[in-house]
Amino acid sequence: MRIVDAKVIICSPGRNFVTLKITTEDGLHGLGDATLNGRELAVASYLSDHVIPLLIGRDARRIEDLWQYLYKGAYWRRGPVTMASISAVDTALWDIKGKSLNVPVYQLLGGASRDAILVYGHASGKDIDDTVAAVAAYAKLGYKAIRAQSGIPGLNSTYGVGRGKMFYEPAEKDAPVEDLWSSELYLNFVPRLFERLRKEFGSDLHLLHDAHHRLTPIEAARLGKELEPYHLFWLEDPTPAELQESFRLIRRHTTTPLAVGEVFNSIFDCQQLIQEQLIDYIRAAVVHAAGISHLRKIASLAEMYQVRTGCHGATDMSPVCMAAALHFDLSVHNFGIQEYMHHSAETDRVFSHSYTFADGMMHPGDAPGLGVDIDEQLASNYPYRRAYLPINRKLDGTMHSW
Ligand code: EZ4
Ligand code: CO
């Protein structure tokens, strides 16, 4: 089953997406997401200029061999641009394999390990009252797990406080927005938010929070400790994870479960975190961690150490990535939770999909392959628009992690 065509489709139905479409001599096609938020065209070029010429004429059935060919064959290993490109190829080939055998991808991955997939939604507000109302709205929609982020008095804008109703979209046109940050104000505020949320919603609702890489290890330890009475499902990205051993310090001080890994692109980024049991959930995503094939290897390592999966699923993971994630989530034994942020109506029109949401749970559907397609004609009405993620500065102007 030879690959006869491959092309990159760049579109912006509300936000930018980079999609790889691979076609075989049998007339089947498969899709892979290659979106790297704020750096989309670098991946598109890597695919068009370097990867696609290598794909034409190859056997689409040899998924693992093609993965290794693109990984080992580049000599320059890893990095978000390379790994997002490999992911797009890998995901598209799983899609094709499913279609050629007439089964949904999860059946190729060992079949369903559960009936449905627990997902969490994103509630945010400008202050505590607003955030309480947003959490209530999500609970009313049936969500059993909700991430809560709130504006902080004294800071003009805060990570995770959305503009849309059902999603949070940080990328802005033309130039990066500049946020202001104070760990002191944040640390004094967040425990009060969760004290109130537990008071309002009781103990059964799963509550999550994202610190978005902003704290030092000892600050993160303090936050984890002070949040213990409110039993978070997880505290996400408490400190940047380039230094994996820094999580030892956090771990020594708190039993609040930790989730890390949305910016990871390989198993080597989380090897120490998993093997030393420094985290509870690994957040690597299909699109950024080199596809379904590589993410399954990460999950297998994690399974040995009782670390569960919690894939990144913000709006910059396209519906193609979302579908791939749901097939992965349904099949893998040590699944924990899946992030789910609604896409805009325009995005859903461009990318039709078979996955569904009901009562706080999702299912990828039983269409052959991934169960997602792209309307290229419609997509062409939404040309690429340059957009950047925000940057973050401390109150004295020092650059800080966003
Ligand atoms: O900042 O997807 O948990 N979700 C997140 C997201 C990320 C964006 C980056 O592209 O942290 O909001
Ligand atoms: Co996050």
Image: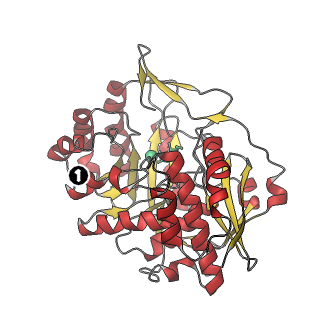
Question: To which quarter of the image does residue 387 belong?
Answer: top right
Residue drawn at (65%, 83%), measured in percent from left and top? 100
Image-quadrant location for residue 245: top left
Colouring style: secondary structure
Q: Position of residue 161 (x, y in %)?
A: 53, 38
Q: Is residue 277 above or below residue 215?
A: below
Residue 367 visible in the snapshot? no
User: From the viewer's perspective, is 320 left or right of 326?
Assistant: right
| Residue 333, image x, y percentages | 36, 75
Q: Please tell me whether mark 1 sits on a helix, a strand or a loop.
A: loop
Q: Nearer the viewer, residue 88 or 315?
A: 88
The picture quadrant where one finds residue 358 is bottom right
Side (left or right) of 239 relative to 365: left
Of the pair 116 and 55, the residue shown nearer to us: 55
The residue lying at 60 percent from left, 80 percent from top is 98
In the rendered structure, the answer to whether residue 248 lies left or right of residue 366 reads: left
Q: Which residue is mark 1?
A: 278
| Front-most of residues 135 and 222 | 222
In the image, what residue occupies the spot 68% across and 65% down? 56
Please, what is the three-letter code of the amino acid marked with disc 1? Leu
Where is residue 141 drawn, in percent x and y? 56, 62
For disc 1, the neighbor class at 10 Å (few under 14, some 14 to 19, many from 20) is many
Say which quadrant the N terminus sits in.
bottom right
